[in-house]
């Protein structure tokens, strides 16, 4: 499958509230870019579903709307489940999101976490 990312991902460990059709759950972002995030959760939403994320941040939470572009709903074991989300719109906190993403890029000591947009997602 051809990689569609235009921006490199960076490790971005943050707690996030995910609100989807099935309800609201607390999950964890593993990595992020300007266009999207990967959320590790035992109950990922289905591909194509809209979700609202509230990223727990300081000094204020970041709220955005996203669409599920990849989901591992059928993965064996909750630890392997998650969903890839394309950011569609920031409700609030876009400047803070950009600043935190930039800070995380500068502080990342392991180049293995930074993947070129053409790299495929490993397991």
Image: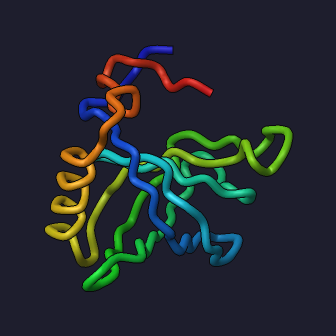
> In x, y percent, where is residue 60?
28, 85
Identify the image quadrant of residue 2: top left
Specify whether residue 34 is in view: no
Q: For this rendering, which residue is in front, 70 or 116?
A: 116
> Which residue is most to the bottom?
59
Identify the image quadrant of residue 91: bottom left
Q: In this view, does 25 lie above or below 34?
A: below
Residue at the image point whose x is 36% and y is 33% from the top:
110
Left or right: 17 as drawn, with respect to 6: right
> In x, y percent, where is residue 104?
27, 52
Q: Is residue 23 above or below residue 68?
A: below
> Which residue is most to the right?
76
> In x, y percent, where is residue 114?
33, 31
Q: For this rendering, which residue is in front, 20 or 75?
A: 75
> In x, y percent, where is residue 74?
80, 41
Q: For this rendering, which residue is in front, 21 or 4?
A: 4
Q: In this view, does 69 lie above or below 25?
A: above
Left or right: 26 as drawn, with respect to 50: right
Q: For this rendering, which residue is in front, 89 or 100?
A: 100
Residue at the image point whose x is 80% and y is 51% from the top:
78
Q: In this view, does 116 lie above or below 89?
A: above
């Amino acid at each position: 499958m051809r990689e569609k990312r235009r921006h490199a991902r960076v490790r971005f460990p943050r707690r996030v509230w995910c609100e989807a059709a099935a309800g609201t759950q607390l999950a964890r972002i593993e990595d992020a870019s300007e266009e999207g995030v990967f959320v590790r959760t035992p109950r990922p939403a289905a591909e194509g579903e809209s979700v609202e994320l509230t990223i727990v941040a300081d000094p204020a939470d970041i709220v955005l709307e996203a669409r599920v572009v990849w989901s591992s709903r059928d993965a064996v074991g909750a630890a392997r489940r998650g969903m890839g989300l394309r950011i569609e719109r920031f409700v609030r906190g876009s400047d803070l999101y950009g600043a935190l993403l930039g800070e995380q890029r500068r502080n990342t000591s392991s180049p293995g976490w930074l993947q070129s947009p053409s790299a495929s997602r490993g397991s």
